[in-house]
Amino acid sequence: MWIPDVYFANARKNDLGLKNDGSSITVSPDGRVFWTQRIRIWVNCKMHIAKLPWDEQLCSLVLGPYSQNMEEVEMVWADGAALANLENQTSGEWSIGEGKDIMSIDPPKPLAYETVCMPTPDGEVCHNKSSSFFTSKTGNYSESIVSFVLKRRPAIYDRIIFMTIFFVGIQYLGLFIDPAAAPGRIALGVLMVLIVSNHMAAFKSRLPKVSYAVWLADFMFGCMILNIFCFFTYVLVNFGMQAHTQLEALIKADKEKASALRQALKSSQQSDSIDLSPAAHTTDRSVVFGFGFGKQNDRNTPMRSPIDLDVTLNVLKPEEVPRDDTWLKRLAKLRGLDRSMRMIFPLVFGVYIAIMYGIIHTYPNVMADD
């Protein structure tokens, strides 16, 4: 009995007629012959994974006779031919497309085209089938094409998305740790950044190398940036704490200087034998108190009275010591940034998640057959 030498044009590998695979031949009274043969096939399928994990891929099977041209053999689909056992054609990540959402293909010079649908437990599943021919140096050859959509099951990737969000949440909880506990804050911040970074690298290592953006990879990268931003917040808080410590040290030093000055002035007033009465105000004597508060008097310049001395002592307050510490005071305010970020960060993260889920449709979902 003559059997056509059928081959799959877009197959990477196929196992046809292996031992114990079995085959069946049925001959009808009208002369029709029905031949079946089990085959295992690995087919090339172009994929565009920009919307991963919500992407859909259009794949095709192209088969035809290898050595017989159209004058000898013409490949056409039998009436009502469809993919069998579609309810079982699923894997851990893929399932056959549901509903009439199969994208049509436009084979060159089509001889026939038909969309076939069949019910499954999950709904109606359709696939396209068409017949066409191609021309080579040895003549025209018939071929048949069947196309179907593979839908990725996003539930497989829910764990990746959840863990990424979880690690950002752990970084956020670090804002409630005492900023003075620098080793703990630094260790937590660096650890969360490294975990998200390694998590993203492990995921991308499983993807094919592509030149376009992938939604899930972009989402994980944005979460890593938020983790880095949260860690950088503590850097500013710690810098503000250092500025505040330096400012307190300066104020304390000013108070000690002012206290020493008052003691020196009081000691000078008690030990000095100068007559500070009004009658002696026109004397020629020089009086120096502490840091130059006395001055050389002439006969036309009266000396300070005891009242003037008291006024001089009262104005020597620490906060009025001349010093440009404006920037130091501003930097010291950064130590309160933690409290502000406890409210700002969850809002920013929530907006980021909403935006990322809102722009999924902007990622192209190009489905093409090979």
Image (spheres, rainbow, N blue to C red):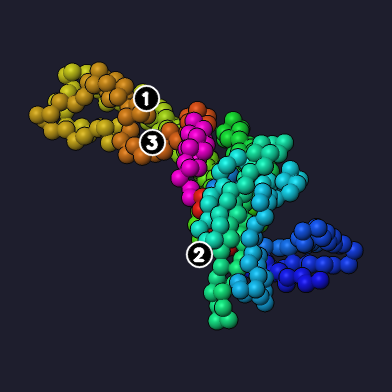
Is residue 27 rendered to the left or right of residue 65? Answer: right
Q: Amino acid at mark 1?
A: Lys
Give the residue number, with chain letter if any, for mark 2: 108
- Which callout, 3 or 1, points at the residue further toward the start of the chain? 1
Measure the C-alpha gap from mark 3 to mark 1: 37 Å
Give the residue number, with chain letter if any, for mark 1: 266
Measure the C-alpha gap from mark 3 to mark 2: 73 Å
Identify which residue is drawn at 63% across, 41% down.
98
Q: Is residue 59 magenta?
A: no
The crowd level at tag 2 (other Cα within 10 Å; few <14, some 14-19, many 20+) is few
Would you say residue 335 is visible in this rendering? no
Residue ranking furthest to the front: 30
Measure the C-alpha gap from mark 2 to mark 1: 109 Å
Q: Quadrant of the C terminus?
A: bottom right
* Residue 224 x, y percent position in the rendering: 56, 46
Q: Nearer the viewer, mark 2 or mark 1?
A: 2
Q: Amino acid at mark 3?
A: Arg
Closer to the camera in the image, 14 or 162:
14
Give the residue number, with chain letter if any, for mark 3: 330
- Which callout, 3 or 2, points at the residue further toward the start of the chain? 2
Say what secondary structure mark 3 lies in. Answer: helix
Residue ranking furthest to the right: 20
